[in-house]
Amino acid sequence: MNRLRLGLLEKDLADRFNTGQTEVSKIFSTWVDKMHDCLGRLSFLTDHDTVKKFLPNSFKPEHEDVFLIFDCTELFVEKSWQVIQQSATWSEYKGHNTGKALIGLSPIMLPAFVSEVYPGSISDEEILSESSILE
């Protein structure tokens, strides 16, 4: 959780908890998989009538047909030692190696969609077209 919340590097966590970097990596991967298994099943997607009923006043009347608000977000990742992965995750916008995901929020700010995480070099439009959300 420290890695996710604070963005701490594996080496730093290994030093803090007196263990090896490989062990930290295994623990982190295991917990991310477990969280995906548990949280990935949740769905906050609601029907259009419910969204309209709880729509914030700032959306009315011009945007009352809004069902989802999309945005891409970038997450910092450690620089890979492999050159191909380094270039794939490099983000000119952030000036750092990143992973990128598309997030869809309902107008009442509940997460309704999260895409797979893509390398940071991919454009927002490419993620939108590769995700199945528009279908």
Image: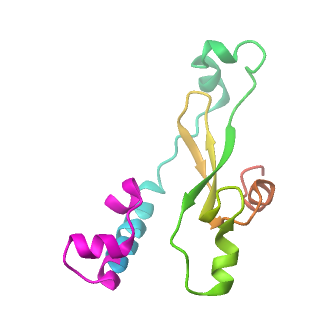
- Magenta-colored span: 1-24
Q: Is residue 53 left or right of residue 2?
A: right
The residue drawn where x is 63% and y is 57% is 101
Q: Nearer the viewer, residue 86 or 95?
A: 95
102 lies above or below 99: above
Identify the residue at the far bottom of this view.
82
- Give the quarter of the figure containing the N terminus: bottom left
User: Picture coordinates of residue 69 (x, y %)?
Assistant: 68, 37
User: Picture coordinates of residue 11 (x, y %)?
Assistant: 35, 76
Q: Nearer the viewer, residue 111 or 27?
A: 27
The residue drawn where x is 75% and y is 12% is 61
20 lies above or below 54: below
Q: Is residue 68 left or right of residue 10?
A: right
The residue drawn where x is 54% and y is 41% is 111
Examine the image and state in which quarter residue 106 appears: top right
The residue drawn where x is 78% and y is 16% is 62
